[in-house]
Amino acid sequence: MQMLRRGAVIAAGAVLLAAPMGGAVAFASSSAPSTLTIGNIGDADTLDPIFSTSVPALDIEQMIFTPLYTVSPHGRLVPEDATHWTVSSNNLTYTFYLSKAYHWSDGQPVTAADYVFSMDVILNPKANAPGYGTYQPIIKSVTAPSPYVLQVTLKSPTAPFLAGDFVNFYPIPKHILDKVPVSKLATNSYGNDPTVTDGPYKFVAWKHNDYIEVTANPNYGGPPAHIQNIVYKIVPDQNTLVAELRTGQIQFDEGVPPQDVAEVKKFAGIDLKRFTNAEYVYMGFNFKYFKPFDSLAVRQAIAYGINRKAIVKDVVLGYGQLANGTVLPSVKWAYDPNIKGYNYHPNRAAKLLAAHGWKVDKNGILAKNGQELAFTLMTNAGNQVRDEIVQIIQQELAKLHIKVTPDIIDFSTLVTNYVNPGKFQALVLGWQLTAPDPDVSSIFDVTQEPPAGLNVGWYNDPIVNKEDQIEIHNLNQAVRAKAFYKIQEEMYKNPPYVFLYYAQTVTAFTSNLRGYVPSPFLDFYNIQNWSLK
Amino acid sequence: MSAVQREALEADRRAEAELLAYETEWQAVWRRFRRHRMALVAAVVLSLIALSAIFAPLIAPYPPDHLDLSAILASPSAAHPLGTDQLGRDVLSRLLYAGRVSLAVGVSAAFIAMVLGTLVGSISGYLGGVTDTLLMRFVDVMLSVPTLFLIIDAESFFQVNAVMLTALIGFTSWMGVSRLVRGQFLALKSREFVEAARAEGARGWRIVTHHLLPNALAPVIVNGTLSVGVAIITESALSFLGFGIQPPTASWGNMLSQFQNVIYQQPTLVLYPGIMIFLTVLCVNLIGDGLRDALDPRLRI
Amino acid sequence: MRRVLQSIPTLLIIMIATFALVHLAPGGPFAYLVLNPHINRSEVLRLEAAYGLNLPLPIQFIHWFWAMVHLNFGISFQGGQQVATLIGAALPNTLLLVGISLCIILLISFPIGILAAVKQYSVADYTATILSFGGISIPDFWLGLMLMIVFSISLNWLPAGGMLTIGAPFSIWDRIRYLILPVTTYVLVNQAYFSRYIRSSMLEVVRQDYIRTARSKGVRERVVIYKHALRNAMIPVATIFGLTILPSLVGGAVILETVFAWPGMGRLYYQSAVSRDYPTILAITLIAAFAVILGNLLADLSYGLLDPRVQYD
């Protein structure tokens, strides 16, 4: 399963393992259609936003809850329940002023007390909320000075807080749940049928592994939703999903695989939209478990030896954009448009290796001081795109006499036994970002090495380490931008990864749909504004 | 005398005539096998498939993992008779090499299942009593444990390749054979010829190997051929679920699930591994059927 | 009776074996959490402790065993749902799909098997053989997809996946439309196991002495076949049915359920397996084990009913 809560996550992307793709549609009825049926390959875990971790849950929560503020497709923060907010001069206290318009679907007002309650639950270790590890290290206190004012005080100035961790924070209703012992909240029936919510839609039914149904909430504080009913149908097979688009059983598919796009284009009454997602795919080096990667020349030669353009063209059929670093091009203030990348140059790669003393040994593999350039390249099973990338890299590097052994294994095994402990030689995976803040210190900073951290490749670069501290603790965007420029440049000079490409997503939906704007951060951004003609 | 009776007598008479002709047992089997025309055809087809797999390195126009990114998903042509796959590899070449893997998986897994099943079934059937009870309850256990987990568990110890997968399929599919052999043994044990052998002083092991096993072997062989097909299908199903043989090694199963992903782009591709699996498993099953008829000692028509 | 008592230790061993297998599997239920850069590893250890996963395995087993004795299946690690709720939702769907398929299989495989046996090497036999083996030789996910492409995508006659038209009032016809493709696939792929078994059992019995005797006594062919032969041929058939029917009914069909978006037990099991949702996997395995044991038991008992000569001691 894929974690998509806040910040960046590895995109599992496996057809059966994770659920990054989905869709929606309306029932074919003679009059104005009143239902949109969305198809998705995975089911939600729980619909309680404090405890959910799956992509489908996040999709439904966008419909049935209202956050303090959300994020636009361009990465701007957009007020929702909070009309505006201020930051104290010491950069520690955030004050959110709440709208009085929002009510729970049972008529009770949504107040700051609900947010305080929700955050208290997360910060209570007895609750076992997955957000505990996110917020506990940075939040000092959350209080409600008055019913419609919420104050969040941090332990130290943390720049990525507002546009990172705290984006799309959904409250749960205190008056419904405060009698439940905190240790029982995770398994409370609220996660199964959240009847009291505050979003544009309200919960109707959840048939596990079958569908989730919501209907427009007449008590919604914002502009009322146009589409009366939304059905979120779980269709675990990608081919079946396409077939259901054809039969009209679903009218929205959040992610048509590139190889099916041509077919879906032929379907009458279906439109498609293409956009660059907040996800990039990379080949990661492990500096601890394959020593030759310490050599810059080896990494550069590998980067020059991989035909990234061919990968984009042939594996994802052009539905990708070459990536040269960790910052998304859409985050304009931090993205360095002049950052260079490593383009396909096998001759340069071969020369580089020869110049650094690598010679072909009796096994036909490059070697130096008895160490062969032979490593295992891992990825998760069931994801055809990654399978193919691994096989291309194997073949390309074989031409340079570098021996790559593919090892394609079950996602959970890969993550627990190899990725988390940082015990692998090289791997192909993807990171998906769900918030616009470009902070990625948790992946590359020296303080984040396993077992505690996510710097699983044991990358250690003094410049990156230094700039990380600047961008985390300084709230000034200009200062941060400078730091991010330096980080991007350093990651080109001393690459932790071979950055491959940013993924592009194609959504397919009924031509009747109006008001839909694709967003890399939220699958159903502004769904209350969608309508069916 | 009804027609049926006459036929029965006829059959008996012919059987006697054959016995008089000193036809050996295997000649008789072959003669009866030939009567099953479809089995005969199947044997020929399967031999061709097996030969093509064995001689894949000689026949295949390209190495199986030779990439050509300039010609992905190409339609059939003189250079690529069956076209190319998503990475521009020659589909015909991969299909031939995949045949080696799939056939090896099928045959080896079935062999493991037959040997294990026969062993457990013989011991259980011959010794009976507590041993029988224990072994048969063990069969129940094996039928109940989640086999998918055996594969996942194996991943923590080995890189799960074709050999491992074959062993795993074999070790989780012997239970049917063991019940079959046990049943045969139970039925044969009290037959006159076994009693006679025992009266002549034959002891345990000899009775098993000389008297019980040969007579119980027919259903085992039949079941064995059928398990070849089941193993090939199982491998393809595991590939569909993401637990099969992983690329770049090609098997018909993983080619089938790989080509399903491009079914709308190049719909004919999925037919090739599909047809190979279908033909192979069909032939194996028909041969098994022919063997069943041929080995049935009462069947002398 | 002794046979019934034997089931208890068998079940215990199955529980131990399954528990060990599942817990020794690499990966863990909270693997995905660590992929969030803002959650560190100590968080996973904390969660594992909260769910008792840090205790020694034997202790965990005893906890689980005790809960099972009280028929408490526990709570899923994926979202805190009651496992009983998840199974309660999936089991009826699987019973419907597999139950209908098996009924059809039984209805058609008896005539096919008997006909093929009685008229061995006739055109009818050959046709039955080709049809049966044809079905058994096709991977079900392939056949399912082919049918879907023809009947849903090209012809647009039948729905591709799901169980019913969501939101539409209940109608038998609607349910049938959704059942046609998965049931057809299931029947085509699985009927051979049954019809071939019936054929070979019948062939064996038909040639036995007492059948010949019955024939020579002038008993009518029909009576010979249906009264004497079939009854005896049923013994091995009952074994194979006992071994397959009950477990298939509760175990579901993971691949067909995936291809046809059918929310049944097979899919629930597969998803729990990939996400290492221990309580759900264990509960499903245990239910399946129950079915295996019960099926075998019924098969053994049925011998006595079908053939009075067999006595179970």
Image (tube, grey):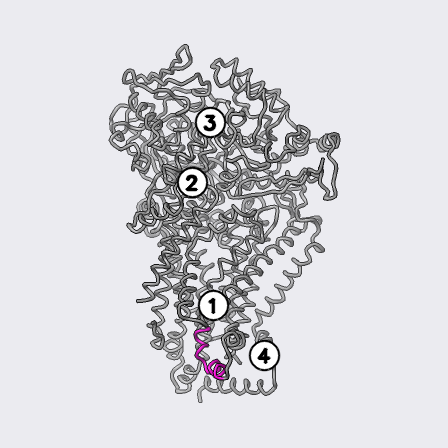
Q: Residue at x 58, y 54 (%)?
A: B163
Disc 1 packing (10 Å; few <14; some 14–19; many ≥20) = many
Q: What kind of secondary structure does the magenta stretch mostly adopt? A: helix
**Up/down of C8 relative to B200, above or below:** above
Determine the secondary structure under disc 1. Answer: helix
Dot 4 corresponds to which residue? B25
**Up/down of A379 relative to B292, above or below:** above
Dot 1 corresponds to which residue? B121
Q: Which residues are magenta?
A: B183-199
- Left of A411 or right of it: where is B96? right
Disc 4 packing (10 Å; few <14; some 14–19; many ≥20) = few
> Which one is earlier in the sequence, the residue at label 4 or at label 1?
4
Q: Nearer the viewer, mark 4 or mark 1?
A: 1
Q: State yes or no: residue B169 in magenta.
A: no
Q: Residue at x 69, y 53 (%)?
A: B60
Determine the secondary structure under disc 2. Answer: loop
Q: CA distance from mark 2 to mark 1?
A: 39 Å
Q: CA distance from mark 1 to mark 3?
A: 58 Å
Dot 2 corresponds to which residue? C29
